[in-house]
Amino acid sequence: MSDTKAHYLTTTLPYVNADPHIGFAFELVTADAITRYWRLMYGAENVFFNTGTDEHGQKIAQKADEAGKDRQAYVDHFAGEFNRLKEGLSLSYDAFIRTTNPEHKVAVQEMWRRCAAQGDIYKKKYSGLYCVGCESFKTEADLVDGKCPDHNKAPELVEEENYFFKLSNYQAYLEEYLSRPGVILPEWRRLEALNFVKGGLEDFSISREKARLDWGVPVPGDDEQVMYVWFDALTNYISTLGWPDEEGNFGRFWRDGNVVQVAGKDQVRFQSIMWQAMLKSAGVKATDQVVYHGFINSGGQKMSKSLGNVISPYELIARYGTEATRYILLRHVHPFDDSDLTWEKMDEYYTANLVNGLGNLTARIMKMCEAHLEPEDYPLLDPKTLDAPDMLNFQAAMDHIWGLIQHCDEVIAETEPFKLIKTEPEQAKAILSNLRADLLHIGRLLLPVMPETSATIRAAVRANKKPENLFARLPE
Ligand SMILES: [Zn+2]
């Protein structure tokens, strides 16, 4: 155990009613790159990376029932599909929390009890506009032409008695919380969230009558009500660390650690407002930072089955391999804004920047070094050399790396060491030695984003040998 501060990072949990989509693959890869970087900087024992699956809710129960499947077996299948991304995307998470875990349910009920003890949970008759597709109530402000914009359907008027969380009690607290610099990245989204809170907060419903929702965690002390998504889904971020046990991983990584969450831009209200109020109510430390990413579109449009432009992470991995998929997601998707990916563009990135860029440069430098230089005993890794700018912005960090690649290409083109070696061998060897050191630096910087490629390049430099081709050409 060291006294370095511990660092915790969690993704959101995807709802398991469909196969993983590319937006979530991006979230996972971003989280993975951040935690790999942290492990280098702070030591692996000081880093905890959580992801998992959100498995309750009526939509899932209905689908399982319709398919004539046992509900638990049904969610087991989807949890397996998500967990399969671990290998495909080379993910290094420490925990995969499933909201159907018995330990998780215990934590969720404790969270509820604490908020209730604080006077923040009350029951009331409620009637509202309910979108079945979203599984949530909508306010007039959420609707476009009277319809849910996500489902293009008018919500139904529903009346029932539910428990509510008194978000309105946390107006002043949330204004203070959201005024802390860095609590949300990017900064403009923090200001947006702060403005939203200043506009006034409505209490939100946190349970459903059992007749409408019977696949979830029971409300403590009320057999007729089942918890609706929020307590169940959000509490995973701490239940995965063993909470309500205050010691162990929870004490180390959450209470005393640096807590970072990554989430999509549509999550601000849930992660930075509702969840933060729940934590405050339960007497648990707030999240230190939530990093919000944009969405990935294709061909200028939102991906959808009807448009036939859905790009699945498995297709990406099949075509480009794990390392190049990570490259495409971390360099060609903006960390905070919406981005657009098409197969044409991805093929171009792959060929220009990996096959002809990094792959070709590595082969050229190491071929010349193998022929003309002796090996040098470089240290395999020196975290102090990982000085790429702003490692939470991978696009910027990757642009920096590809700037170094371009610089090496230019040095080779200008000095032509392969010719110079015949006339000025000492000068040529000095140039090659510098190029090899630069390549090693590139290999080290790549570690959080392309771990295998990084290892191959560093090993090649140490062995002073040209490696096998790093990236195969795409089939014609
Ligand atoms: Zn909807």
Image: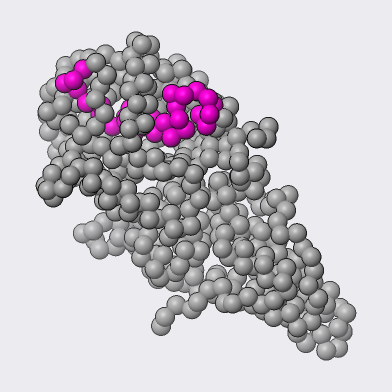
Foreground residue, 42 or 189?
A: 42
Foreground residue, 423 or 150?
A: 423
Q: Where is residue 87 in the image (x, y as percent from the top left)?
A: 44, 58
Residue drawn at the location 37% of the way across and 22% of the way down: 111
Q: In terms of image quadrants, where is residue 420?
A: bottom right
From what the image shows, is residue 208 above or below residue 14? above
Count up the numbered dots: 0
Q: Position of residue 440 (x, y in %)?
A: 70, 64
Q: Where is residue 459 in the image (x, y as percent from the top left)?
A: 67, 67
Indicate whether residue 416 is drawn in magenta. Answer: no
Residue drawn at the location 12% of the way across and 23% of the way down: 159
From what the image shows, is residue 84 above or below residue 216? below
Residue drawn at the location 15% of the way across and 26% of the way down: 210
Horizontal relation, residue 152 to residue 319: left or right: left
Q: Is residue 242 visible?
A: yes
Q: Is residue 191 visible?
A: no
Horizontal relation, residue 19 to residue 285: left or right: left
View extreme (bottom): residue: 422
Horizontal relation, residue 301 to residue 455: left or right: left
Q: In terms of image quadrants, where is residue 45?
A: top right
Q: Position of residue 183 (x, y in %)?
A: 52, 31
Quarter holding the N terminus is top right
In magenta, the rendered stretch is: 222-251
From what the image shows, is residue 258 above or below residue 310? above
Q: In terms of image quadrants, where is residue 365?
A: bottom right
Indicate whether residue 240 is drawn in magenta. Answer: yes
